[in-house]
Amino acid sequence: MMTHDGNSTKKSRAIAALLTTATQEEAAAVAGVGARTLARWLADDPEFRSALQRAEGLAIDAAVRRLVGLQDAAVTVFDDVLSNSSISPTVRLRAASSVIDYLLKLRELRNLEERLAALEDRYNNAQN
């Protein structure tokens, strides 16, 4: 992770606190470091920022895994709302609009992923 100087434990605590608190000031207090120290690490310490980005990436990956587990229930809710004529037309229209919006976003992301993969393949083949 980070170099093993006297601040590595504090920096690790600061990273954990940044992931779980609302403000830098609160994170500094939780980590037991000064707010100015934390601000300096964020501004001037590329190793600290890199470790924070890795930790954020892991947290996002964990959240995505949880969301994937909820997808069937979420789609069922949309299906229930859309197929229930006793629910107000406004709510049903909003649900339908949401479904279409999400599908378009997913399609766009999928297309971008495919295009990026094709570009990476071309780049890799050109390097060989």
Image: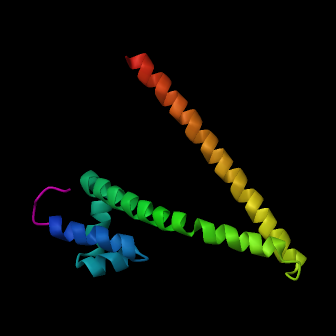
Q: Report the residue at 39% width, 64% height from top.
A: 59
| Location of residue 21 (image quadrant) | bottom left
Q: Report the residue at 39% width, 18% height from top.
A: 127
Q: Position of residue 85 (x, y in %)?
A: 89, 78
Q: Position of residue 118 (x, y in %)?
A: 54, 29
Q: Where 6 sits versus 100, above or below?
A: below
The kind of secondary structure the magenta stretch mainly shows is loop
Q: Which residues are magenta?
A: 1-7
Say which quadrant the C terminus sits in: top left
Q: Residue 1 versus residue 28: which sits nearer the camera? A: 1
Q: Report the residue at 25% width, 53% height from top.
A: 47
Q: Residue 34 versus residue 126: which sits nearer the camera? A: 126
Say which quadrant the N terminus sits in: bottom left
Q: Position of residue 61 (x, y in %)?
A: 43, 60
| Location of residue 5 (image quadrant) | bottom left
| Location of residue 102 (image quadrant) | bottom right
Q: Please, which colouring scheme is shown?
A: rainbow
Magenta run includes residue 88: no
Q: Residue 25 versus residue 53: which sits nearer the camera? A: 53
Q: Position of residue 78 (x, y in %)?
A: 73, 70
Q: How many marks?
A: 0
